[in-house]
Amino acid sequence: MSDATIGSVEQLRDPNYTPALSKAIPLGIQHVLAMFASNVTPAIIVAGAAGFGFGSNSPDFPNMIYMIQMSMLFAGIATLFQTIGMGPIGARLPIVQGTSFAFLPIMIPAVAGQGVAGLAGLMTGVMIGGIFHFCLGFVIGRIRFALPPLVTGLIVLMIGLALVRVGIQYAAGGVPMMGKPEFGSTNQWLPAITVILVTLALKFFTKGMWSVAAVLIGLVAGYVVALTMGQVNFGNIARASMFELPVPFKWGFEFNSAIVIGMCFMAVVSAIETVGDTSGITKGGAGREATDKEISGATFADGLGTAVAGVFGGLPNTSFSQNVGLISMTGVMSRHVVTFGAIFLIVCGLIPKVGAIVATVPINVLGGGVIVMFGMVCAAGINMLSEVNWNRRNMVIFAVSLSIGLGLQLEPTALQHVGKTAQILLTSGLLPSAAIAILLNLLLPEDLD
């Protein structure tokens, strides 16, 4: 779609410009397709970690459907906070919000094997973390100095490294099948490999929407293969209702200090990511730097979206980087285009049948998708680290932070004698790596040879 068919270059760079509906609605849906798979995947992973199961015979399977609904609903609502805004809240830019992968290393151990009982503490942590995230909007400009590419790149890399094991487990059949003969069989791997191959083919040999939605289309291809192999169960679709409103405090309220601390720490990381995405949008779409008002407004919206989602059983939200690239590709800076996409997500989030359809995706198909997505998280961290001046000082900071963080993640029993709260925080690997990197970066002299 050429710029001439949508509007002038000046209009395209104006966030307040709205193309004709015949163009705006498809462009909005394009933003949804670019982020859809990444948005619902964390909800499926957390639900699976809690033990809700991927089969229609699981009594807790409706809870997975509900979590998928909330991931769509509150991605849409948080996006509206950004595009429409309320007072100081919202950047009023085409920022797409979605469920964040970054929080998974904290959320997975927080709910592991606990079923519904683990969600009360998690959602309380999400809500409090969102409030803390909101408050960062007042100071975000003054704390950026403590998070240079050395620190942020390491944090993003550690997020990816903490998750790649999940991708392999899912592709091989999922944690419930570990130790069984079917785990890692050809029948399990074939759909996952199909997802990976189709995604790579589309990403590198096509252009436009085919390339932008490569992961989503790859998941569809793997889904078709799984369907022909009898691995797809449609039992829950008929039982899902056509409309359902979110339920406040659906799983109760429970304060867990480890989860709250973890969520607040990750809120800082998410806030910095949002600052980067906001700057990327204004540079790529309008050729200018983001204003302080836009950066603080984006951070306020980020936190508010997360806090509200936590109240209703949703997961933390953040800005989606893949949509930043989409804006650079299309050249359309209209925030109202993204508003149409947000409305589409909200409608989907209110229809349980949509969640039920998404939940029919077999775990091995999802595994193929998350192998690609989590690998891309690692690659994004390495890309950020490429901006670092690799002198001895920075190499020492990176080496110590990575070794301790990754080591504690690989051997959690090394901390079996510390308190449970400390175990949850430290064995994630992510928090100790980030804390050590931040402290060493602030304390070690710059002129260390």
Image (cartoon, grey):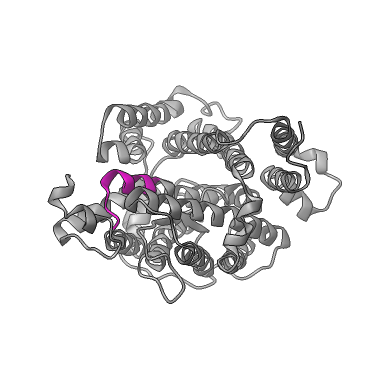
Identity of the residue furthest to the top in this view? 186
Asked where in the image residue 227 lies, by quadrant, the reply is top left
The location of residue 214, given as percent across then percent down, is: 33, 37
The location of residue 57, given as percent across then percent down, is: 46, 49
Residue 323 colored in magenta in the image: yes
- Res 417 seen here: yes
Q: Nearer the viewer, residue 19 or 74?
A: 19
- Res 68 seen here: no
Identity of the residue furthest to the front in this view? 447
Image quarter hosting the C terminus: top right
- State the residue at coordinates (26%, 37%): 210
The location of residue 161, given as percent across then percent down, is: 60, 36
Q: Nearer the viewer, residue 42 or 287?
A: 287
Image quarter hosting the N terminus: top left
Relative vertical location of residue 110 with respect to residue 187 in this rendering, above or below: below
- State the residue at coordinates (36%, 48%): 284
Left-right relation of 395 to 67: right
Asked where in the image residue 353 lies, by quadrant, the reply is bottom left
Q: Nearer the viewer, residue 90 or 223?
A: 90
Identity of the residue furthest to the right in this view? 417
Left-right relation of 402 to 119: right
The location of residue 393, given as percent across then percent down, is: 73, 34
Relative vertical location of residue 324 with respect to residue 375 in this rendering, above or below: below
Residue 301 colored in magenta in the image: no
Per the picture, the main secondary structure of the magenta-coloured stretch is: helix
Asked where in the image residue 386 lies, by quadrant, the reply is top right
Query: From which residue to which does the magenta span run?
Result: 322-333
Left-right relation of 260 to 69: right
Relative vertical location of residue 65 with respect to residue 403 in this rendering, above or below: below
